[in-house]
Amino acid sequence: MELEFDFLIIGSGVAGLTLALKLSPHGRVAIVTKKKIADSNTAHAQGGIAAVMDPDDSFDLHIKDTLAAGDGLCDEGVVSMVVKNAPDRIRELIDLGVGFNRKEANGDGASGNDVGVNVDVDLHLDMGREGGHCFNRIVRSDDITGRAVEDALVRRVKEHENISVYEDHVAVDLITRSTRLRRGLVVATHEDYCCGAYVLERATGKIKTFLADFTVLATGGCGKVYAYTSNPDVATGDGIAMAYRAGASVANLEFMQFHPTCLFHPKAKNFLISETVRGEGGILRDANGRAFMEQYSPDRDLACRDVVARAIDTELKKSGDESVFLDITHKDENFIKTRFPYLYENCLSFGFDMTKTPIPVVPAAHYMSGGVATGIFGRTNISRLYAIGETACTGLHGANRLASNSLLEGLVYAHQAAADIVSGMKAKDFVSRSKEDIPPWDDTGATDSDEAIVISHTWNEIRMLMWNYVGIVRSDKRLARAARRIEIIADEIREYYWNFKVTPDLIELRNIALVAELIIRCASHRKESRGLHYNIAYPEKDERWKKDTVLRRPFVG
């Protein structure tokens, strides 16, 4: 079955939905999302969006903080562009109906459920502060900013007649001009351009061919590559894996950000304790009540995430304890309940009253600072293929993402990509190529699998392997072990994949295995410690490694 569109967007987080709305006046848009439209990392983002919206703040300060967090690997031009775009993107969200917290006349914070603010007057935004920022510049909607943004975007997308949403559709592989399906191989050439994707419909098990003039990867992150993560189940690195298989360059995958504070509880799956808790005075303590962050950074509990995560990891290894504790009990009870209503209620549901008891927390895989390598407009090295949001490596984050720059990046790069795509459509030499003869999906000889246990077992093996050997602190020996094991696993998955009909679980397993392999390769290559990558064999930063780690699949003719 073939479906033709002007634009194909794979993913439905802030980047994908924003781009869809911006492209919809210029053609027919298809959004492919593997679960429901609101199932994304965006919806789980608690903290907010970093933006200079206060006259006492400045672009230069936000740029400086971003560059400091990125530890020498940020693209300064990209950082400047993103930071200076931020206020306009915030105003666009307000126009879409996102209710950000605003100050009342007496300066106190007001709930973020107000909409329809006139963006031409002082917005009086009540902004928070997070680690690595020298100023209160986190624009927020209580402690559920991501959900507020996602909900507003979903409402607008569903109202638009030019946007078709395909829920429960799982992208399998990108289609390039020279795509030919062989046993275990998608072939590309140097003259390639992308013309769509093969997509599995979950309900029927059938593969559809989506054809488009422009294809955009907005698939989010890859936290599920690790055993412990703040990410939802959809975060399996699909965009990175598909892009690499198609011949796109990927970069800096050694820089996985581990969020320092996820709730430690056997039933608290993926439950993040927002960095804004520390921004409002929360203190990290060990099991004996000792505040320990001053030993690791002059910024103490407001140090950047890589510093805090390693500090917690060190403390847990020294003590043998299962968690440390985040303490904000010294703050007024009403302030805590008003400032963190979502966190308060959820912690309470697990038996923790954060107004009276420190919260047990541990680090967990949170954000991929690397990804599909792109330029300032989100273009990849494959013509007509773009990547935006967490799946991309734009140069904004460098070796470590600054808090609350993630939603901002998605918004700005959706704007950048939309402008570039529309410009490309209007170019004199533009020719629509979606109707070219594309080979249909071929699963000849493949049978239905009756061994689902193989997938679940291998899935768990990869995730524990990555957590134990490629986690917060690494070593050459651990990385070598991981590389040997992932090679064996990849061979097993490759044989399984081409012998059985594809399923959503098999597609995701194939993707996390490839992304795990790419992370290991990048981490093994970098012989220093910088930002989110820490190797005990090379504990210092080395200026000879002040460069991106770029991988690209060899082309096959």
Image (tube, rainbow, N blue to C red):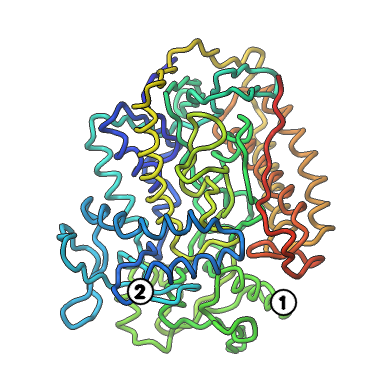
Tally the numbered discs.
2
In the image, residue 9 lies at what x, y percent? 42, 34
- Residue designated by label 1: 320
Rendered location of residue 345, percent (x, y)? 36, 69
Q: CA distance from mark 2 to mark 1?
A: 42 Å
Q: Is residue 47 above or below residue 160?
A: below
As shown in the figure, which amino acid type bears the numbered disc 2? Asp
Question: Is residue 522 placed above or below 350 in the rendered structure?
Answer: above
The picture places residue 27, in percent across and down from the top left corner, at 30, 27
Is 96 rendered above or below residue 437? below
Can the viewer see residue 44? no
Relative image position of residue 521 (x, y in whole percent) = 74, 47
The crowding category of the residue bearing disc 2, from other C-alpha atoms within 10 Å (few below 14, some 14 to 19, many at least 20), is some
Of 279 and 77, nearer the camera is: 77
Q: Amino acid at mark 1?
A: Gly
Q: Residues within 10 Å of mark 1 (few under 14, many from 20)?
A: few
Foreground tag (2 vs 1): 2
Q: Residue tagged by mark 2?
A: 57
For residue 385, side relative to residue 507 (left or right)? left
Residue 94 lies, with reference to residue 109, above or below; the image says above
Q: Secondary structure at mark 1?
A: loop
Q: Is residue 362 left or right of residue 353?
A: right
- Residue furthest out toward the front: 428
Of residues 516 and 167, the one drawn nearer to the viewer in this rendering: 516
Q: Nearer the viewer, residue 546 or 114?
A: 546
Seen at 50% across and 10% down, the residue is 437
Identify the residue shown where x is 44% and y is 59%: 80
The residue that appears at 50% across and 73% down in the rendered structure is: 132
* Picture quarter with the N terminus: top left
Residue sitting farthest toward the top: 437
Please name the residue shown 40% across and 21% down the image: 430
Viewport quadrant of the C terminus: top right
